[in-house]
Image: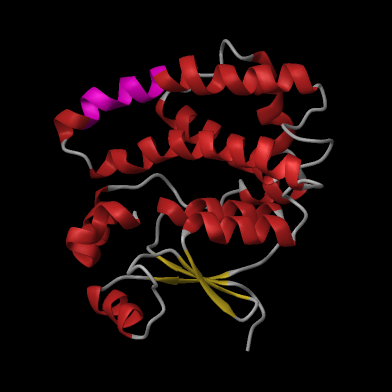
Amino acid sequence: MSGKPKLTYFNGRGRMESVRWLLAAAGVEFEEVFLETREQYLKLIQDGDLLFDQVPLVDIDGMKMVQTRAILSYIAGKHNLYGKDLKERALYIDTYVEGTMDLMQMILTLPFSLPEAKEKNLPLIIEKAKNRYFPAYEKVLKQHCQGFLVGNQLSWADVHLLEAILMVEEKDPTVLSEFPLLQGFKTRISNMPTIKKFLQPGSQRKPQPDDKYVATVMKILKEAMYYSI
């Protein structure tokens, strides 16, 4: 039996993409099982694998873990990406991660919106990135002067921020034009060996969601869709 983590989710980004990013940054190989039918999803529920009837589901170290934040916290702690002490974790890493989660969640739900809502909400998301989130991280980098958000080594917060930056840049390629420190951060973190590998074509990084992905998720989850994308 393989010792690699096994990720069960849809064949797309959603809430599992941050798990893929963090495992890749840690240099951990993983396997994936893609949900393609509602029957697969219902069987996971019937087998008791989904505590709250939601994916992601990650089999790791003999555990079946659900809830994205719990999964990410475990991976970060195991692979030395969660700071050196409780203060770094709670005051800095958790805080920064929560900010990027808020930003990314707005983008994750966008493909599932009605066309008129997409047209209305996308400019608002870009505006919030430029005026609320990215200024805060620019300030952190200026004050910290270490090249990383926390301490003097890569952490979960750095990985998460890079993921968020790239997601927003897919919607507005000029979004970092007024943030020179974030531009440097993006280049520096993107060129770390494990992350650079993950960003290459052919990796397990998923593309932006298309209509086929949205239709598959909606078919499988139906009324549970919002809580599990």
Decide if residue 229 is in sight here.
Answer: yes
Q: What stretch is highlighted in magenta?
A: 118-127
Q: Find residue 92 and report its image quarter.
A: top right
Residue 129, given in percent of the width and then of the height, sits at 46, 22
Q: In this view, does 145 lie to the left or right of 158?
A: right
Question: Left of 117 or right of it: where is 91?
Answer: right
**Residue depicted at x 52% and y 33%:** 99
Question: Which of the colour schemes (rainbow, by chain, secondary structure, one colour) is used?
Answer: secondary structure
Q: Look at the image and say whether residue 132 sits in the magenta stretch.
A: no
Front-most of residues 95 and 62 = 95
Q: Where is residue 23 in the image (x, y as percent from the top left)?
A: 64, 58
Q: In which quarter of the image is the N terminus?
A: bottom right
Magenta segment includes 121: yes
Image vertical order of residue 175 relative to residue 223, above or below: above
Q: Residue 184, position in %: x, y?
A: 71, 23
Could you tell me residue 220's position as x and y percent? 23, 66
